[in-house]
Amino acid sequence: MSRPLTDMERRKQISVRGLAGVESVADLKKNFNRHLHFTLVKDRNVATPRDYYQALAHTVRDHLVGRWIRTQQYYYEKDPKRIYYLSLEFYMGRTLQNTMVNLGLQSSCDEAIYQLGLDMEELEDIEEDAGLGNGGLGRLAACFLDSMATLGLAAYGYGIRYEFGIFNQKISNGWQVEEADDWLRFGNPWEKSRPEYTIPVNFYGRVEYTPEGVKWADTQVVLALPYDTPVPGYRNNTVNTMRLWSAKAPNEFKLEDFNVGGYIQAVLDRNLAENISRVLYPNDNFFEGKELRLKQEYFVVAATLQDIIRRFKSSKFGTRAAVRTTFEAFPDKVAIQLNDTHPALAIPELMRILVDIEHLSWEKAWEITKRTCAYTNHTVLPEALERWPVHLFESLLPRHLSIIYEINRRHLENVSKLYPGDHDRLRRMSLIEEGSIKRINMAHLCIVGSHAVNGVARIHSDILKKTIFKDFYELEPNKFQNKTNGITPRRWLVLCNSGLADVIAEKIGEDYICDLDQLKKLLGFVNDEGFIRAVAKVKQENKLKFSAYLEKTYKVKINPNSMFDVQVKRIHEYKRQLLNCLHVITFYNRIKREPNKQYTPRTIMIGGKAAPGYHMAKLIIRLITGIGDVVNNDPMVGDRLKVIYLENYRVSLAEKVIPASDLSEQISTAGTEASGTGNMKFMLNGALTIGTMDGANVEMAEEAGMDNFFIFGMRVDEVEAMDKQGYNAWSYYERIPELKQAIDQIKNGFFSPKEPHLFKEIVNMLMHHDRFKVFADYEDYIKCQDRVSALYMNSKEWTKMVIKNIAASGKFSSDRTIAEYAQQIWGVEPSKHKIPPPSEPRE
């Protein structure tokens, strides 16, 4: 068995991360020591590891700042169309290593830190994840920012600087326990506060209709303070900006409060305003209609639009004087992309600004708004769609409610002209849903107020057109597009799997890092014995390294020659972690039944967070840990099967587990996963996929060839047919003995001996009201897993299939996705232009 490389061996390798120059190493050491000197408190003689991390972060940041300033100057001089990506979530993870990779500094930093007698990996592990997102949607936004900078687009990410990001997950007695993620407690060296751009945001109040126009009066003001984070492109000297807003209370205390003793309370009440940016709502694919959440959504939109308009009006670097006085050119200079419906209020807010403040006619304002905004849909699950109660708007955003009513009136007038007498269609297409509680359908608002609507995988975009947005598609078919998601190859290959990145570069050169389609060249090496060995060796090294991490973290002995079978994603019934559980139990029962038979050993890892209020998801975690307790402590099973629950799954843990994985579980019910992006990360890092024909799996299988993918289960049309005829779980339970045995064990407390009825709700759900039809796909899934096991025993054939998958993963770069958005939605062209570095004179 090959061993992991030592630090010295790794440093001697020629790497895609660049060669270390003697001068740059010396400079980095000098700057590191300078920062360390100023970071240290005067009365301390000994630096802590955190001091070393801070010194390194500031040293690397120095290389960003000049490029950042120059990029912004360049944009003001060239005045390109600017792209504004609005998202309530940016799941950035760690920044240090990503910055070193994108600036080409990693090898020099590695060498400098080594010469200083420090361990680079230990320093990197000190950095807190910026966990300002729940899962795929927030991580996609992060990948998109990387690609927009790499493609030279003048792009800005806008969101909220949550004081507390996605909670930290602890597993205690098998249960998920949530802990607050105080990610800012040691400061954040990557952000810069910009108090000079603080913006007032209004809430509550009333609407006044005056001869001069409509006024929103008697509002409560909250200030939005921006924090900027640099976003470097890959070795092109472009550094874009992610601007996150923090809520601050205004300082206006009434003088009389001092006299009546109200001063203390007035100061304490500031918290109410500042709560807006306190915490990320921890729901993924579930709508929670809380007032604070609506406040967050309006807060980010109102602050961002004022910022966008300020930037549009002034076009000289460093000046705030208005140069543009007309909005005619606004859609030619501004593109706003709404990442799901969370920033949907951008549409009525832009209308409010244009009509009430800038005094444009409704018709002109509406034309500008539609041409500027575009909407990305991320889900078809009904419980995830935002539908806000009208009474909440009446209180919190009364002017926006009146604007939405007017948008709806004109929209329905248009529909009734095209479909006279079709009242049912009017009801279906209205922005306002009638019922016991009147609600605003935010997806409908986004569609009506945008010039482009896209899904995030081909099958998902087709489902939108055929089902939930069918009426809107019939009305405006040209508005609907598909933009299959992608991932950035910088973080998800070069950063997290440098060994594989180097092996690929040795065969086809380094240019693939910014042109992932070049991976197709690897097909020429599928039968190259040396390349097969090199790919297998990298995987084995990654597995050994991750095994050591698991053994240290979970005190479980791992067989590094076993298949690493991994399902990491949010815990949700539609993602069907329960189907995975049923396979684990079936495999366990087979070993118990025939202990002397030869089996392909597996280490099955499942990880992910459950929304704190999602009882079934938390119970599923408890079942997984219960199965692990039984399996891992059964001497008859030994190292042929281990079950690990990966605690606190997050970006930095994904960077460790994905390169070590052999099998990627993408097993949602067909038609429920919009796209998935974890599936792409596994494919690029040399794991094979077992999955349903759902989301981007469909296109991944198409690219790799069905023979190189483990596809099982019902297709979308079969799921729809079963919905019509009725799904009968009992019939599968009665007919399939291994399934019956597994369910009976769960029901009878085999995996919860101290609480025999612990999992009765899971069994009841699976037997009587399983929306996601776990049993219907069980048999095919087990057969497919048997095929996986058989192939894994043939290491060479397995690795050849891995190479074919890596070679086919080029389509799933976020560079390709962003190039499509740019050309087909935003009306801009990606550029390979390199901005001169700060060390060179400007052109």
Image (spheres, rainbow, N blue to C red):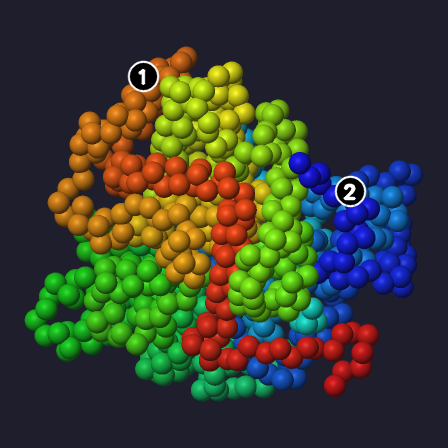
* Position of residue 130 measured from the top left corner of the image (x, y, whole percent): 60, 49
Please name the amino acid that badge 2 sits on: Thr
Residue visible at 38% across and 19% down?
Answer: 593
In this view, the residue in front, 194 or 373, is: 373
Left or right: 538 as drawn, with respect to 286: right
**Residue 353 image-quadrant placement:** bottom left
* Position of residue 681 measured from the top left corner of the image (x, y, whole percent): 52, 53
**Residue 478 image-quadrant placement:** bottom left
Marks 1 and 2 sit apart, C-alpha to C-alpha, by 49 Å
Please name the amino acid that badge 1 sits on: Asn
**Residue 748, label in figure:** 1
Q: Nearer the viewer, mark 1 or mark 2?
A: 2
The answer to whether residue 53 is visible is no
Q: Quadrant of the C terminus?
A: bottom right
In this view, the residue in front, 59 or 242, is: 59
* Position of residue 394 measured from the top left corner of the image (x, y, whole percent): 32, 57
As helix, strand or loop, the secondary structure at mark 2 comes to loop
Q: Residue furthest top?
A: 754
Left or right: 144 as drawn, with respect to 841: left
Q: On the image, numbered disc 2 is attached to which residue?
A: 6
**Residue 20 image-quadrant placement:** bottom right
Residue visible at 25% across and 39% down?
Answer: 776
